[in-house]
């Protein structure tokens, strides 16, 4: 378990550093996704499988899709096709793929190792849910209001421009 | 189960946080700035998970859930703002916004 923690942590730090040094935003996004997956493995080794699953689904899934969506949306123009071809050259994915392979091997190692050993120190999703909807219920309501405010705000900011263009 | 020491977990969180902070200060692309913010929020969540693992309590994971919800809302509004800024200034450079008036 210790070994898996340090390895995933090293992958997370390396991927984050490579993300910061990329010039191209899409390449940086690839490394950021690897970094988030590595942090998810760290969560798993720390005995938080529920947080690890949420990290993959919400961070590496939903939030990264938002980023990619906006990056692709901003690059509408004559140069877009050429730039996209440049982004998708085979050499680009080698770095992120290598780091991801390390994580995959680690995942197999963790799944093959004794599951009972893992669960002794783990906080299972049931305990998290009981805490979440027990003493923290008011915070859940506040978080839902925050998400609603974010939804309305994003809709307003995104809609404003389309409306203006329709009038012009 | 061999416990990961608290110090090492917090050290990893601190390293990721300082990397994110460096990116926030160094990079001038607005999308890169938002991504660095994500890294920093993620590192803060990692610190909570480490603490939750240290004391075997669910509270740290609960707080991580709230950080997750906050990050999602922040990114949605932030990216909508990025799009507005790009429409208005035709640039994603942070320095292009330093003369914002009215």
Image: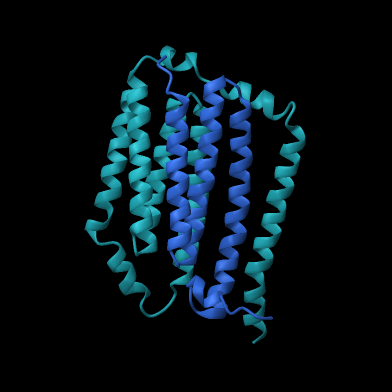
User: Where residue A56 appears, x then y in whole percent?
Assistant: 47, 40
What colour is chain A? cyan
Quarter residue A115 falls in:
top left
What is the quadrant of the N terminus of chain B in the image? top left
Of residues A12 and B12, which is closer to you in this image? B12
User: Where residue B13 appears, x then y in whole percent?
Assistant: 47, 38
What is the quadrant of the C terminus of chain B in the image? bottom right
Which chain has been coloured blue in this picture? B
Say which residue appears at 68% left-offset and 50% top-offset: A147
Would you say A10 lies left or right of A162 here?
left
Say which residue appears at 71% left-offset and 44% top-offset: A144
Of residues A166 and B70, which is closer to you in this image? B70
Residue A123 shows in this picture = no
Would you say B49 lies left or right of A26 here?
right
Would you say B96 lies left or right of A157 here?
left
Of residues A5 and A152, which is closer to you in this image? A5
Residue farthest along the right direction in this orientation = A138
């Amino acid at each position: 378990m210790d070994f898996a923690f340090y390895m995933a942590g090293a992958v997370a730090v390396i991927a984050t550093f490579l993300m910061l040094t990329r010039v191209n935003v899409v390449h940086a996004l690839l490394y950021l996704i690897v970094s988030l997956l590595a942090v998810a493995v760290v969560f798993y080794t720390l005995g938080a499988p529920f947080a690890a699953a949420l990290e993959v689904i919400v961070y590496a899934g939903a939030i990264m899709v938002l980023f990619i969506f906006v990056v692709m949306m901003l690059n509408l123009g004559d140069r877009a096709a050429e730039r996209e071809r440049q982004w998708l050259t085979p050499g680009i994915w080698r770095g992120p793929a290598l780091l991801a392979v390390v994580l995959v091997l680690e995942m197999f190692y963790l799944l093959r190792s004794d599951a009972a050993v893992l669960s002794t120190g783990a906080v299972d999703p049931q305990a998290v849910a009981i805490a979440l909807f027990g003493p923290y219920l008011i915070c859940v309501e506040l978080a839902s209001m925050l998400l609603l405010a974010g939804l309305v705000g994003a809709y307003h900011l995104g809609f404003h421009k389309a409306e203006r263009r329709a009038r012009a | 189960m061999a416990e990961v020491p608290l110090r090492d977990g917090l050290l990893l969180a601190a390293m990721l946080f300082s990397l994110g902070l460096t990116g926030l200060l160094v990079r001038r692309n607005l999308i890169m700035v938002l991504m660095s913010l994500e890294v920093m929020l993620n590192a803060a969540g990692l610190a909570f998970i480490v603490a939750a693992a240290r004391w075997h309590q669910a509270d740290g994971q609960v707080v991580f859930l709230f950080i997750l919800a906050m990050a999602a809302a922040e990114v949605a509004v932030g990216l909508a703002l990025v799009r507005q800024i790009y429409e208005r200034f035709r640039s994603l450079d942070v320095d292009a916004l330093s003369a914002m008036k009215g």
